[in-house]
């Protein structure tokens, strides 16, 4: 399969970076073709531009957006790797979604989950959080993320096959054993989610 990894974290010494490196290595060793969109390293501009509103007039989108869309179209599956910041996606990733997953391409009629062109792609989201599962549940982070991202983005664009795994307590105090266990789990999730065609 062709897998696009959309990676969103500014630090190379982060657990998110370790997740990305592990996932890419495992996918490639399993025979998948992998492309990485490293949003910070590539300097992606997350802020909507005036030109981006061409989507609502059925006019051509800016070249940089067309290029990102080509990456998505190339892929059979997408892995998002990112931290949970303020109960949501990082601004960089939210901006990528705002600009790339546009009207007339990723979605047209939100009442028709097949109106966009992306519904056959599988999605695996690997999210890190500093809080524990109990702390996240206490503040309904799981419900908020489900509503905002799974319903508000994935469902809206017609994705039918998506999985989310939250790696909690990633706050600088994690043990080597915990990190190793999480990385092994991430590898297994990749194997389970992206079975060769």
Image: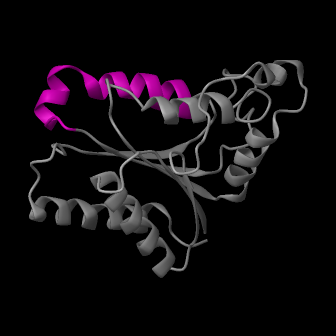
Q: Position of residue 188 (x, y in %)?
A: 33, 67
Colouring scheme applied when the structure was drawn: one colour
Q: Looking at the image, how many numbered discs can be counted on the residues?
A: 0
Residue 149 left/right relative to 139: right
Where's the N terminus, which quadrant?
bottom right
Residue 68 left/right relative to 26: right
Quadrant of res 96? top right
Can you say whether 22 is above or below 125 in the image? below
Q: Residue at x 48, y 45 (%)?
A: 162
Quadrant of res 74? bottom right
Judge whether residue 101 can be spotted in this image: no
Judge whether residue 73 can be spotted in this image: yes
Q: Position of residue 117 (x, y in %)?
A: 75, 42
Q: Residue at x 81, y 35 (%)?
A: 62
Q: Residue at x 61, y 27 (%)?
A: 98
Can you say whether 51 is above or below 154 in the image? above
Q: Per the image, is 132 magenta?
A: yes
Q: Residue at x 32, y 34 (%)?
A: 84
Q: Position of residue 55 (x, y in %)?
A: 81, 24
Q: Nearer the viewer, residue 51 or 28?
A: 51
Residue 69 left/right relative to 17: right
Where's the C terminus, which quadrant?
bottom right
Can you say whether 114 is above or below 128 in the image? above
Q: Position of residue 121 (x, y in %)?
A: 62, 51
Which range is magenta?
130-154
């Amino acid at each position: 399969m062709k897998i696009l990894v959309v990676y969103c974290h500014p630090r190379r010494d982060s657990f998110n970076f370790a997740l990305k490196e592990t996932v890419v290595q495992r996918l490639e060793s399993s025979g998948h073709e992998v492309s990485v969109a490293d949003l910070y390293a590539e300097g992606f501009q997350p802020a909507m531009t005036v030109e981006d509103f061409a989507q609502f007039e059925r006019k051509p989108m800016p070249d940089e957006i067309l290029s990102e869309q080509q990456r998505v179209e190339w892929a059979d599956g997408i892995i998002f790797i990112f931290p949970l910041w303020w109960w949501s996606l990082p601004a960089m990733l939210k901006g990528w979604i705002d600009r790339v997953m546009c009207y007339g391409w990723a979605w047209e009629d939100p009442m028709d989950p097949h109106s966009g062109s992306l519904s056959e792609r599988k999605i695996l989201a690997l999210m890190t959080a500093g809080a524990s599962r109990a702390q996240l549940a206490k503040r309904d982070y799981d419900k908020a993320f489900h509503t905002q991202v799974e319903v508000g983005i994935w469902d809206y664009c017609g994705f039918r096959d998506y999985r989310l795994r939250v790696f909690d307590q990633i706050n600088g105090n994690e043990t080597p054993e915990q990190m190793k266990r999480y990385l092994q789990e991430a590898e297994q999730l990749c194997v389970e989610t992206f079975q060769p065609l």
